[in-house]
Structures are given as structure tokens and as C-alpha cells.
Image (cartoon, rainbow, N blue to C red):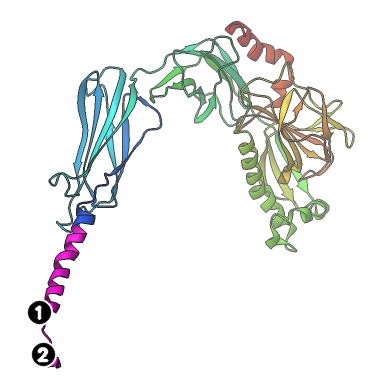
Amino acid sequence: MSKKGISLKPILVVIVMLLISIPAVWLAIIRMEGTAPALKIELESPFIGASRTLSVSVEDTGSGIRKVWVGLLVEGREVELLQRAFPSSGFFAGGKEKSVVVKAPVSPQSLGLADGKGVIRVVAWDYSLRKWGEGNRVYLEKEIQIDTKAPTIDLISRSHNLAQGGSGAAIYRLSEDCPVSGVTVGDQFYPGYAGYFKDPSIHLAFFALDYQQGKETRVAAIAEDFAGNRSTAGLVYHINARSFRKDAINLSDGFFNAKMPDFERYFPEMSGGSRVDLFLKVNRELRRKDSEAIYRVTERTEKKILWDGAFLRLPRSANRARFADHRTYFYGGKVIDRQVHMGVDLASTAHSPVPAANRGKVAFTGDQGIYGNTIILDHGFGLFTLYSHLSQIDVAEGQMVEKGESMGKTGMTGLAGGDHLHYGTLIHQTYVNPVEWWDDAWIKNNISAKIDDAGPR
């Protein structure tokens, strides 16, 4: 048959069939898809306080999201919290939105809802043409507890005599279990812990005043329940202001030549350069990084008190520097730097044994920059002691040590100019004056007496 004799009719039929079948297949697979949207309620806890915002994640990768409804059911009453429709991209395209997060504010009191159990219900529809165009629908429910009452804080410790740069202890009873409670000192928060007393509602918090916090500092107990309701109770306290010693430190070429080569490993770009510039880098940047590393160690603490009685100081030692000494560094008769010394320097004979100041758990051992070889002990409830510039470490992380047990030997590692022990005391991330904790009378008056008066243990 010649080309002129070929009929175009079958070809046209095939083209027409394809033009009809492709949209039909697309319509059946996409626009008539039968998968409902996926829902997720973002709720950190099942408790709803005086004000809360619910986050709901909705996803539909098929025909897209048509509508989301969020409601709250309490005692048979249903309250609408949110209803939102989402746009279409046209009949063939379905919904514009494939994934959304909607936020529904919840204020039980303004909605006239009483405290008690309830249910969050979420409903979502897609743009599928199933069910006569209504689309696929999905429900998700989650039980909640409405709690709009703030916890009550009953202060058991009645008075708190504090020194600038010193420590304190507060004991209080909570009306309900709270995930967050403790003492605020200015902008600093010190958590309280239950479990030390037989009464589980009684909490104990050690807290601190930074050396810069004076008489104007506000101190209060706070508690926040699982619903986010927060209470504050002012403590009765008195702050004794302190002035701190000013210390002049004269640096020499001999000191730089002896100590700076070891610190080139931290700042290799300064190798072979000015020893003075390297010292300033070490005394500022490395000091800050070391402090941050120490603070990270003290973020975790044993949830029990491990220590007992007054803390020990290095035997037969003399003070070489005091807590919060304000140091001015001189070189060639000129001021080159200023820093604050956050501990006590104790000197005895070279390589003297270093005892644990009290019973505790070894939280850290290792080389810590300007502090050299260092041990940090966790004594529980956020109380830590620090031992630095050691020539030898004889304990390991996680090990329990007893009061007076030898942990290593004094030395001059780090930025130490001579053999001594740099000894520090911290309450969580705040350095405090160690002298208080060496004083048996201070501990009895400020810690032990309060604990004894609070109830059985």
C-alpha cells in the first residue's frame, strides 16, 4: 500500500485515547488518592497552664492540605481553638500547601474551662476528590490536664546571712511536684533538690553570690510546675558587702621564657612571636575558654549530698593569693593586663600531697589550660571543689574519694610561676570564697542548723 493510502484515523484514535486516559489516570492516582494527612501534636507535657500555645504539624504530600481544625474537649464540652483553610492551586493541582505547622493559643480561664482532665482533638482534610469531594479526613486526640494554679512555696529556712562572694542554703516546701525550683540571685538560677528529707515535698538549694553582687542583689525562691505556672517567694536575707584585695604582679622575661613556650600549642599562629602578646592571649582568651570548660563540668551534679562537716585545706600551707584578688599585671613598669583570681593559692613544700577537701565524686581530671593538671570534685547538689597546677594526678573520673584521701601532688603546671595549689570552690557555675567552707562554725550556722531544723532525713 502506498503512503498516500495510509489511513490517519487509527492514529487520531490513539491520540484521542491518550489525551483522555492520561488525565483519567492522573485523576485516579493523584486527585482520587486515598491517603489521609499525617498529624502530630507538639506538646512537651500533657499539662496546660494559664496560657499555652499548641503546635500541630500537618503533612499531605499527595493532594495537599485543605483544612485543619483544633478543639479542646472538657467535661463533654467542645471548644474550638482554631480553624484554618488552605488555598487550592486549581482542580488539577490540588492544594498549595503540602506541609504546615499551625499554632493554637489556649487560655483555659478565658475560655471558661475549669482545671481537670481534657482532650485535645485535631482534624485535618486534604484536597482529594474522594468522598464526593470532601477529601480524606484524619483525627488525632491527646489527653491533657488543665492546671492554672501556681505552686505554693513555703519557706522553711527563715533567715539567710550572706557575704558578697559567699554561699547560702535555702530550704522550702512545695505544694506540688515541680520540674523547676530553686533560688534566683540576681539573674543567676540555682536549682533545688528533693530527696534529702523524708518529706519529698521539701527541697534544698545551695546558692551563691558572685563577688560582684552587692547589697542591692535580689534573692528569691522560685518554682514552676509542669503546666508552666510560676511562683516567687522572697527570702529574708542580709548581704554583707566585701572589698577585695588588689594585687600587683610583676612579670619578667624569665617568666615568659619559662612558661610561654608550652602555650604555643594553643595558639600556634603566634609561635616564635612576641612572648608578651602570647601571654595576653593566654591570660585573656585561654582563661575564658578554661572557665567555660569548667562551667560545663559543673552543669551536672550528684542528686545527693556526699560531703560531711568542714572542708579541709592543704595541710601546713600558707596563703599566696586570696579569693577574688583583683590582679594588675605589670611588665617593664607598665600595666599590660587585669584579671580577677577566682580561688585561693596555697603553698607548702614542693610536690606536697593534695587531699580531697571532703568526700566527693571525681567529675574531671586532666590538663586545663592556664590551670594545668586539674581535678574537680562533685560533692553533690551543685557544690564542687577544684585543685589545679598539679604535678601528679592519682585519681580517675567517676571515682569516689573520701575526705582527706590523697589525690595527687602540688606542682607548677599551667600558668603557675611556682609550686603551689590553686584551690577553688564553686556552686554550679559560680566561684565562691572557699574560706567559708573551711570554717566549721560557718557550716553549722549557715548550713547544718537549717537542715536540722527542717525535719527528719
Task: Check if mark 2's residue and mark 1's residue have beta carbons within 8 Å.
Answer: no
Q: Which residues are magenta?
A: 1-27
The disc labelled 1 sits on which kind of residue?
Lys
User: Within the magenta stretch, is there residue 23?
Assistant: yes
Q: Quadrant of residue 315?
A: top right
Task: Give the farthest residue toward the right.
Answer: 349
Mark-to-mark CA distance, 2 and 1: 12 Å
Tell me what residue is drawn at x 17 percent, y 69 percent.
18
Q: Is residue 235 above or below residue 349?
A: above
Q: Is residue 216 left or right of residue 295?
A: left
Instruction: Examine the residues drawn in magenta and state their main secondary structure.
Output: helix
Q: Quadrant of residue 358?
A: top right
Q: Position of residue 262 (x, y in %)?
A: 78, 53
Label disc, if present, on residue 9 of the rendered structure = 1
Callout 2 secondary element: helix
Image quarter where the C terminus lies is top right
Callout 1 secondary element: helix
Q: Pointer 2: residues within 10 angstroms few (<14), some, or many (20+)?
A: few
Q: Which residue is mark 2?
A: 5
The residue nearer to you, when weighing 381 against 170, is 381
Q: Is residue 397 above or below residue 401?
A: below
Q: Pointer 1: residues within 10 angstroms few (<14), some, or many (20+)?
A: few
Task: Give the farthest residue toward the front.
Answer: 1
